[in-house]
Image (spheres, helix red, strand yellow):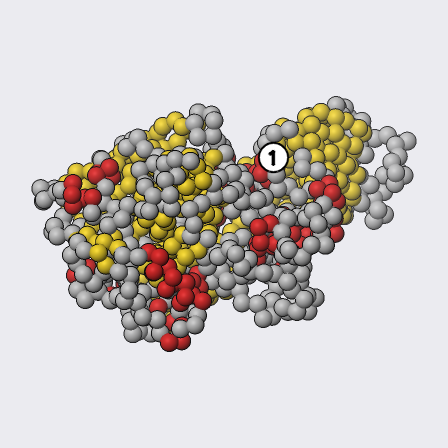
Amino acid sequence: MKLVKEKSGANKKDASRQTPAQISPVFKTADMRDMKMDDQKQPSPAEASKSMAMPMTDKNDSAETMGGMKMDDPYAGDALAQNIRKAKANLGPIKITSRTRLPRTVRYDLYVTDTTVTYGGKPKRAIAVNGSIPMPTLTFTEGDTAEIYVHNKLKEETALHWHGLFLPNRYDGVPNLTQMPIKPGATYLYRFPIIQHGTHWYHSHSGLQEQIGMYGAFIMNKRQEWDIPTLPVVLSEWTNMKPEEVNRSLHAATDWFSIKKGTTQSYAEAIGSGNFKTKVTNEWKRMNAMDVSDVYYDKFLINGKNQLEQPQFKAGQKVRLRIANGGASSYFWLKYAGGKMTVVATDGNDVEPVEVDRLIIAVSETYDVVVTIPDDKSYEFLVTPEDRTKSASLWLGSGQKVYAGKMPKLKYFAGMKMMNDMMDMHGNMVQMDGMQMQNQIMDMNTVMYPEITGPEKPEAPESKTSMPAMQMGNDKSMSGMNMAPESADIVTLNYTMLRDPNKTTLPQGPVRELKFDLTGNMNRYVWTLDNKTVSESDKILIKKGENLRIILYNNSMMRHPMHLHGHDFRVLNGQGDHAPLKNVLDIMPMERDTIEFAATESGDWFFHCHILYHMMSGMGRIFSYENSPPNPEVPDPKLAQRKLFWDDRMPHLMGRIGLESNGSDGQVMLSNTRWNAISTWHLGLDAKMGYESETMIGRYIGRNQWLFPYVGFDYHYKQFDPDEKNIFGSDYRNMFGQISNKENRHTVVAGLAYTLPMLVVADARIDGNGKLRFQLGREDIPLTSRLRMNFMINTDKEYAAGFRYIVNKYFALSTHYDSDMGFGGGLTLTY
């Protein structure tokens, strides 16, 4: 890490990009597979073994101390400054290696093919590049030119995005925005200069291909590097479910993933844990169960393995891990059994070294950390997804295994109570007076961490050794609130601890401020900025030479890793001129964070949430430089835009079919971000039970999408029985006193559906004959982790109630009573 300002300008990035010195990985011969060089001189094995050296003031292969960093007086007594000094001292002398060879053209040929993997215990389709998952590590040195030939051997389109790289817009790799997709059987050349350094990664930006293997490390070495062992580490996850089915299931609001993770938070679980009031309050505010992640995964991977052994490291060695989170939707906690981790870079940019016990790495973020092998043993570097369902391990060193300690299960009802306190009845986050919600300073999920706030059911409730859960004052202030942001014994990294060793102030220029609210609807899985998807928004026009300041407010209960293509931005975190540079900002619920960057490019650049399924839902914007020349890779911009917009306009099919002894009832929906076409039916075994079908199309209104106006057609036939009665007596007239037409109805209808507290849907409509109907109903009341209840009642004097026991994702045992069809039992198929 560069702790004193480099005196040579040869190794610096373009100042206009505001990207100070960064750290990069070892230049290994193992990474040279699949790579072809031009005729320029190749590095010798000795040079290669030394190639990962961090630039210091001396360019020779000599030991350098970590001295030289001078803290400004205002930080003399600051805890961060003390941490930095200690981290530097513990890093000790660092040897460096200089690259004396001239810059060269480095060629890679990447062959994209289908393959089969068994990560989740079953053979499933994946995508490999050069036969590898992750994709091969691509290694360059600053000043080189990258020549990357992508050979698409798939039966579908693809494209590769170079995450965090500064490069010509035409090579950024976003299909239908910066290039047209690479067709099956075609070869495409990405050619760009390497004008930066650091730990980055690359991945497919086509559809959902990233989820099934298309991700890999992209390493750009400095001309001078630390000469210590270095290991690129790519984190990812695997699901046996096809990613298209994952995406559809999220939009269908199935809770199958919660069942698999054990996070249903049903009424039985609430009562059993003393959280019944919390559960009722949660649904009164029209919220679903608390969760920290969307998808259930079968396996978590480190460089393609769940257990990765690296026995070559010896006692006393320091090892630099270049970590990239290549997961599609998983945040990961990182812990090390051998002691503290020293964070030295993020998103490819140097930071002053800080020591931490753990950190959480957001989707698509990168961190460089240095760890020490204390003894001749094998130390666990533990990688745990945020939901703590499973884990993966990297073992450093050989000998007896030393475990990092599994992370305990989250206290979901504590999180639900916190969420209830933070959300008002209108679905907005409540602003807390005196609470500084920015830059990860206060993790609201701390209340869910047993290692911080104590177990959910402490053995000795009267004991004061554990932290109590957060208590919120009724005046929306800090008064009465008890939430320790961190145990004194556990140091967790947050953004305020990141400080660039150099000044990162932007060049002089006009400043323009933009504000965005991060918004979403978990029930229908719609994620937006300012309640608009990419396809619903105009491009944001920016001018070269201006400075953009972006204020982001997260008005949702999910974290969002916001990524800006082609630029680094300053994170305004209290470090003044030394604000860290990043290209991904993890913004937590309720946070209001500010970033800024210099507009130095041309073309169209994507800004989006990097959770793959949020991005596909439309959570992003396009920054477009004014007066940019036409992109030769996009010959028909209008066609490309239509294809790009299809991602968040795509309809999703879902449905439920009941096959029971009293007939069949069910519904089928075709739904997208705003529109929903739905057909429901209730078919008895004979005309006495009746046959009914309602088909409607409507549009959801508002950010929360609680209001749904619709039009449609209703067909209802039932054989008339003058003696028929139910609990309301005769159904000859409806509850409005109108003569009922439900025995023989075939007419158009128009109405409004609205979601009430407790997630009950109120539906008021009028049909073409002037008949009114008002209905209340709810589906999927979670009685236990797998048992669901539903009910319906309306002014036509119809009513029904039923139960479903979920056997697997697609089948359930069911029973229900219907005022027309009577009792029945059987199977329900869910799609």
Q: Is residue 223 left or right of residue 603?
A: left
**Could you say whether the residue bearing mark 1 is in a helix, strand or loop?**
strand
**The N terminus: image quadrant:** bottom left
| Residue extending furthest toward the bottom | 73
Q: Position of residue 597 (x, y in %)?
A: 35, 65
Q: What residue would you read off at disc 1?
A: 655
Q: Nearer the viewer, residue 73 or 806?
A: 73
* Vertical side of 713 occupied by 86: above or below: below
Q: Position of residue 783 (x, y in %)?
A: 72, 39
Which residue is depicted at the point 42% across and 43% down?
381
Q: Is residue 517 left or right of residue 576?
A: right
* Vertical side of 226 occupied by 234: above or below: above
Q: Is residue 831 left or right of residue 360?
A: right
User: Which quarter of the picture shows residue 471?
Assistant: bottom right
Pointer 1: residues within 10 angstroms few (<14), some, or many (20+)? some
User: Which quarter of the picture shows residue 570?
Assistant: bottom left
Q: Nearer the viewer, residue 378 or 638?
A: 378
Give the amino acid at mark 1.
Answer: Gly
**The C terminus: image quadrant:** top right
Q: Position of residue 311 (x, y in %)?
A: 34, 36
